[in-house]
């Protein structure tokens, strides 16, 4: 049981990073500074601390590379109007009477095919607002439907959080996406129940000022789904045929197909640049996340947590969902939370004979419980999509946590059944 830093230092570093993030310091810098202070206080010395931070950041490079190339798909889906077309089609097909279901399902699918959850909500918001006005729904109801649908889609998507978790446990990305399908469906059902309940409240009803009519010409549905369909087929080749197509190839290829199919080949450069601009932030965040994950991983924290769990007579696998919940709440980020928890506790969970795929799935689901706290950007981006006040946005946090907890509990049950 050798470690370079004590538990106090690791915890202090994380606390400092959280405080700095809350104080609006750039999250990546907050995490780097927290890692540096935590390592020194933890008894590692300056040289060991810096080396460990660099090693931790280096360990994120494969994830960062895949995430950067995934920006081509995200940029293509957004700029070609494909994401909006998919959402519009789902909402129109399900109709006004099933507005909440339509909004939740639309956001789930947009996120599941590779659009980041905050962008998924922003993309669906104008359509949701329009149908919400016709159906007499409240802001709270439609926003929760979008957020909950996004959370359900996020744990079965080729998004940064899924990539980071699969990399940490060295499991196939497609297998991890498939593993959480049942938890995602339960989360969707919980979303529909809670959003329907909230949508009937009239104190925050949508008004005409909220309406955003998009006059942009959208592609036909076949062209809109072509890119995501290519990605799904390529990623499915490994479990179905034993042919491994890395996400590094599948995701950008899907983006290129989307651009070509929608007749926007001349816009390839600006669309891919737009996509890159959307993933640069999360890529830099992951580098900062890697530094503090490196410190925590090289500290006594994981051993002390295991000792505590054993003292409480709790099974070791509980560490997976618990760490996902805790780290995502600390960083107010699904990606950062899933990454830190996976990087830190993967060796411990594997040593305790918890299957890698199940452990990754439970951490991933857990990271959606309290990831939308006010010190993160998701909180503000989603609230802004429907012009909601911070006070009203705060009231949704318990409902969001309930949705994330639903998928987490189901992920644990699935593990227990299949173990």
Image: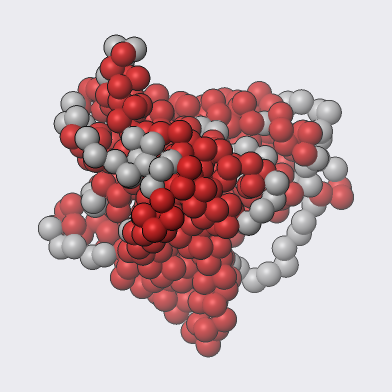
On screen, residue 239 versus residue 165, left or right, reads left
Asked if residue 358 is positioned above or below residue 110 in the image, the reply reads: above
Percent across and percent down for residue 401 are: 55, 29
State the residue at coordinates (80%, 52%).
211
On screen, residue 13 versus residue 57, left or right, reads right
Q: Is residue 142 visible?
A: yes
Where does the C terminus fall, quadrant-wise? top left
On screen, residue 268 versus residue 162, left or right, reads right
State the residue at coordinates (54%, 77%).
273
Percent across and percent down for residue 137 are: 74, 34
State the residue at coordinates (41%, 43%).
43
Q: Nearer the viewer, residue 53 or 151?
A: 53
Asked if residue 171 is positioned above or below residue 305 in the image, the reply reads: below
Question: In the picture, residue 8 is in which quadrant?
Answer: top left
Where does the N terminus fall, quadrant-wise? top left
State the residue at coordinates (39%, 58%).
47
Q: Which color mode does the image show?
A: secondary structure
- Residue closest to the far bottom: 266
Percent across and percent down for residue 198 are: 69, 27
Q: Nearer the viewer, residue 383 or 373?
A: 373
């Amino acid at each position: 049981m050798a470690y370079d830093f004590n538990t106090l230092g690791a915890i202090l570093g994380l606390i400092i990073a959280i405080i700095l993030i809350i104080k609006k310091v750039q999250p990546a810098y907050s995490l780097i500074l927290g890692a540096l202070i935590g390592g020194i206080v933890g008894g590692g010395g300056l040289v060991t601390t810096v080396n460990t931070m660099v090693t931790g950041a280096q360990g994120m490079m494969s994830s960062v590379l895949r995430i950067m190339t995934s920006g081509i798909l995200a940029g293509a889906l957004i700029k070609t109007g494909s994401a909006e077309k998919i959402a519009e089609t789902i909402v129109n097909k399900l109709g006004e009477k099933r507005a909440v279901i339509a909004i939740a399902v639309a956001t789930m699918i947009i996120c599941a095919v590779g659009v980041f959850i905050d962008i998924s909500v922003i993309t669906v918001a104008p359509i949701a607002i329009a149908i919400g006005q016709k159906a007499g729904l409240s802001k709270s109801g439609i926003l929760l439907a979008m957020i909950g649908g996004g959370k359900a889609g996020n744990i079965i998507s080729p998004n940064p959080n899924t990539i980071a978790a699969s990399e940490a446990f060295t499991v196939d990305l497609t297998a991890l996406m498939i593993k959480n399908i049942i938890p995602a469906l339960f989360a969707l059902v919980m979303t529909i129940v809670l959003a329907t309940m909230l949508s009937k409240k009239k104190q925050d009803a949508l008004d005409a000022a909220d309406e955003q009519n998009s006059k942009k010409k959208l592609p036909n549905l076949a062209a809109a789904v072509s890119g995501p369909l290519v990605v799904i087929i390529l990623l499915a080749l490994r479990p179905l045929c034993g042919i491994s197509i890395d996400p590094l190839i599948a995701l950008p290829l899907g983006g290129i197909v989307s651009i070509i199919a929608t007749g926007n080949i001349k816009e390839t450069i600006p669309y891919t640049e737009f996509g890159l601009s959307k993933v640069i932030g999360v890529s830099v965040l992951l580098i900062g996340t890697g530094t503090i994950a490196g410190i925590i991983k090289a500290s006594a924290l994981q051993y002390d947590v295991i000792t505590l769990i054993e003292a409480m007579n709790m099974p070791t696998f509980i560490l997976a969902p618990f760490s996902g919940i805790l780290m995502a709440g600390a960083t107010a980020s699904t990606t950062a939370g899933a990454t830190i928890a996976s990087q830190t506790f993967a060796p411990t969970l594997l040593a305790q004979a918890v299957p890698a795929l199940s452990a990754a799935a439970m951490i991933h689901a857990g990271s959606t419980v309290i990831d939308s706290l006010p010190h993160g950007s998701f909180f503000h981006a989603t609230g802004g999509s429907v012009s909601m006040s911070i006070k009203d946005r705060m009231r949704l946090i318990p409902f969001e946590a309930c949705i994330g907890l639903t998928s987490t509990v189901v992920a644990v049950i699935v593990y227990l059944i299949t173990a």
